[in-house]
Amino acid sequence: MAIDELRIRQELEVLNIAFWREVDSNWGRNAHTFFTEDGVYTTSHKARRGHAEIRAFYTERESRGPRVARHLIHNFHVTVQDADHATCEWTMCLYADDGEAPLMSEPPILIGAVTDECVRGPDGKWRYAARTTRALFKGSKPTSG
């Protein structure tokens, strides 16, 4: 049976949109569930391995107080290895600042090159085995990652 690369691409794009919606709209409280149990999430600051470390990152971020963030996804590219493994490469623009909306409009605080190693589990769901963000441009305001 041939691999349906277009379907896999769509599934991974939907996964990515759902992940950032979770982070931007729900403080990332369930962000860890998008990763494999031993998944590695490397932000522009550090790597976190496994559900507990990823969950702790977002819990700590929420505890610091109000923040508005929007992660925008651009140039989404997928390389399919097989029916259960794929690599996504894309560009992220992050607009974020501490405080309550509406905030002053500023340039993005980060433009990053992101690489995702994705695995489809036995339950049929795609998850991140690894996500790595490499900063290309940084604004004057700090990222929280």
Image (cartoon, grey):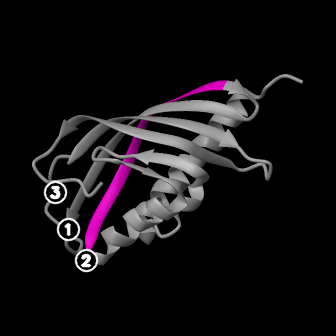
Q: Residue at x 20, y 35 (%)?
A: 137
Q: Is residue 81 left or right of residue 124?
A: left
Residue pointed to by mark 1: 98
70 in magenta: yes
Position in image of residue 31 (x %, y %): 50, 61
- Which is nearer the N-term, disc 2 or disc 3? 2
Q: Residue at x 68, y 24 (%)?
A: 81
Residue pointed to by mark 2: 65
Residue pointed to by mark 3: 105
Amino acid type assigned to the residue bearing label 1 in the image: Asp
Position in image of residue 113 (x %, y %): 36, 33
Amino acid type assigned to the residue bearing label 3 in the image: Ser
Label 3, label 1: how far apart the Cα atoms are: 13 Å
Q: Residue at x 24, y 44 (%)?
A: 110
Q: Nearer the viewer, mark 3 or mark 1?
A: 1
Q: Is residue 103 left or right of residue 22?
A: left
In this view, the residue farthest toward the left is 140
Front residue of 44/111: it is 44
